[in-house]
Amino acid sequence: EGLSGKAAASERSPPAMSSGDEDLALGLRAMESSLCPVMAYYHGCDGDDSLRGWARDQIVRAMTSVGDVHSHGGRHGEAADWYVRARPYAEASWEARRGRLEGGAATLAVEDLRAQRRLVELDAAVCEAMLSCPRGEDIAVLDDDDEEEDGEGTTDKAASTQTRRLICRAG
């Protein structure tokens, strides 16, 4: 059976993005780009530990936000990737806070609880993203070793050129 010209064209071409989708994609690119200078500072910083800790916390927040945008857009595999990539930074933040508390040298502060909560929430976000993936979709994340070598923090470019490690095979 033949299709009318309009129906045939709609089957061949991908659906047009709405202005809201375009705005979301633009915002996503801006969020990814904003990570570059913060990651460059974090990975290249030899000085002030408090500023390095601040940069690490911002990396966690930004990567989690990028993952949230991907999840909102139904790209759960990409969301899981960003959450997994944020986890080492969240874990380092919690370890630094926990180390400060050992031996009773300091009292528990709101920032300590916040660091622990971020780590736990990232684990929950990874699980949620994995469970939300459509059947038949693998989840692969950037290989940790390759990401550490990227001292410039070029996250948008790196995602297309770095090695990916399969963490969940489609079922």
Image (tube, rainbow, N blue to C red):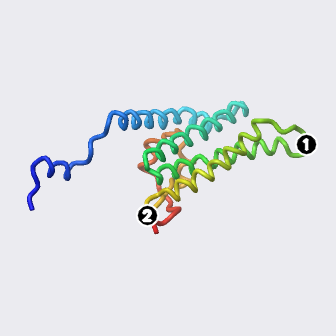
Q: Which residue appears at 76% of the width and 41% of the height? A: 113
Residue 131 falls left or right of residue 91? left
Label 2: few (<14), some or many (≥20) within 10 Å? few
Instruction: State whether residue 56 is above or below residue 164.
Output: above
For disc 1, the marked residue is 104
**Residue 46 screen position, x and y as percent:** 68, 35
**Of 105 and 169, the residue lying toward us:** 169
**Residue 169 screen position, x and y as percent:** 48, 66
For disc 2, the marked residue is 135
Q: Which residue appears at 68% of the width and 50% of the height? A: 120
Instruction: State whether residue 21 is above or below residue 167.
Output: above
* Outermost bottom residue: 171
**Residue 99 screen position, x and y as percent:** 81, 45
Residue type, numbered disc 2: Arg
Q: Which residue appears at 60% of the width and 38% of the height? A: 61
The quadrant the N terminus occupies is: bottom left
Residue 105 falls left or right of residue 45? right
**Of 34 and 154, the residue lying toward us:** 34
Check contact, mark 2 vs mark 1: CB within 8 A. Answer: no
**Residue 88 screen position, x and y as percent:** 64, 49
Residue type, numbered disc 1: Gly
